[in-house]
């Protein structure tokens, strides 16, 4: 191991230590938010562990489709002011509506262009997965992308300390709030596809999932880069992204893998942290249960909550007990 590698690993270790106390705080905060924010059920389904231990390729792709519905609806509303077409919402399971989305009045033309590109990509992902799954594609479940004081975005922002009790976090109010809302999703999408890769047995489906993973990684990097650049002039924005990262980390288990965007010190100088990697330069993975912990905004084994108030459709539906 070179001296530079040893130094970098030391930097990562120190960052872990600094985040430990904040992570424990967020664990408690999210637990309280789950109770206050709508009585999310804490029912544990031990039998689901067996059902989820050997999912089929269709199960995995349908799990991904649920997440793509969420992202596509958020971005499509933010950019165009409308949701997905009704023909792209049908399928097996209970179909639900996406509530609360609206168009953002972007002031930064670059952010507006980025947002439009991502929206089009996410809509394409929904259409692609639905085509691959055919008649077995799940319907869009109920999705909460609203901005009321009890909405998923507000509960997430409140648990992260961005807003106070009874306040609402409006992700459609301005460019910066939109970017923070996007930041909640994008890193999760990357880790979800990477974590799902070993579960897919068909090489054709695996290649398709890898293609979506690559695009999600581009999206995540884009959002992180813009937040980082804007945070140079507005440190509070960068801090907001960091506490969202810590809040995600508090939900998905004891490991401390999630990373914010604040710069780190390497060899006496500052370096950006656009790509959240481990000491080997690899992206992190999340299990399906860990992904659901974050989108359900709950660290218990539950089947609904947060951005999916009635749960997701398909066979992989339960978050992990952490």
Image: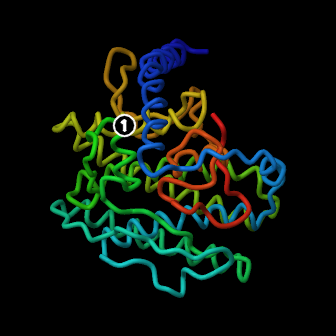
Q: Position of residue 317 (x, y in %)?
A: 67, 57
Q: Which element is circle 1 on?
A: loop
Give the color scheme: rainbow, by chain, secondary structure or one colour: rainbow
Q: Residue at x 33, y 14 (%)?
A: 268
In this view of the protein, which residue sits in the foreground, 272 or 90? 90
In this view of the protein, which residue sits in the foreground, 193 or 7? 193
Up-down relation of residue 57 to residue 297 (above or below): below
Q: Is residue 165 left or right of residue 61?
A: left
Q: Residue at x 78, y 64 (%)?
A: 57
Q: Please give the residue where the numbered disc 1 appears in the rendered image.
A: 160
Quadrant where the image shows the C terminus: top right
In this view of the protein, which residue sits in the foreground, 134 or 297? 297
Q: Position of residue 207 (x, y in %)?
A: 70, 63
Q: Residues within 10 Å of mark 1 (few under 14, many from 20)?
A: many
In this view of the protein, which residue sits in the foreground, 87 or 273? 87
Q: Position of residue 288 (x, y in %)?
A: 66, 49
Q: Residue at x 53, y 74 (%)?
A: 96
Up-down relation of residue 148 to residue 275 (above or below): below
């Amino acid at each position: 191991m070179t001296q530079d590698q040893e130094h970098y690993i030391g930097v990562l270790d120190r960052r872990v230590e600094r985040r430990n106390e904040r992570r424990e705080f967020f664990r408690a905060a999210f637990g309280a938010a789950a109770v206050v924010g709508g009585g999310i059920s804490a029912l544990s389904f031990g039998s689901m562990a067996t059902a989820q231990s050997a999912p089929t390729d269709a199960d995995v792709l349908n799990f991904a489709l649920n997440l793509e519905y969420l992202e596509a609806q958020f971005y499509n509303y933010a950019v165009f002011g409308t949701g997905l077409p009704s023909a792209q919402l049908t399928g097996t399971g209970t179909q639900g509506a996406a509530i609360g989305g609206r168009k953002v009045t972007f002031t930064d033309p670059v952010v507006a262009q980025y947002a439009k590109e991502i929206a089009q990509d996410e809509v394409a992902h929904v259409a692609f997965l639905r085509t691959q799954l055919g008649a077995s594609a799940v319907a869009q479940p109920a999705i909460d992308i609203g901005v009321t004081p009890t909405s998923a975005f507000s509960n997430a922002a409140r648990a992260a300390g961005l807003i106070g009790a009874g306040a609402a976090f409006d992700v459609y109010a301005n460019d910066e709030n939109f970017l923070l809302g996007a930041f909640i999703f994008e890193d999760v999408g990357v880790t979800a596809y990477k974590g799902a890769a070993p579960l897919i047995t068909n090489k054709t489906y695996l290649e398709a999932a890898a293609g979506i993973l690559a695009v999600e990684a581009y999206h995540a990097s884009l959002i992180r880069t813009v937040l980082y650049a804007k945070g140079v002039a507005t440190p509070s924005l960068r801090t907001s992204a960091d506490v969202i990262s810590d809040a995600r980390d508090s939900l998905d288990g004891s490991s401390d893998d999630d990373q914010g965007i604040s710069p780190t010190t390497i060899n006496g100088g500052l370096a950006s942290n656009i790509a959240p990697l481990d000491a080997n330069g690899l992206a992190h993975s999340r299990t399906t249960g860990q992904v659901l912990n974050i989108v359900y905004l709950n660290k218990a084994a539950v089947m609904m909550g947060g951005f999916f108030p009635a749960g997701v459709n398909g066979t992989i539906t339960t978050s992990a007990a952490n």
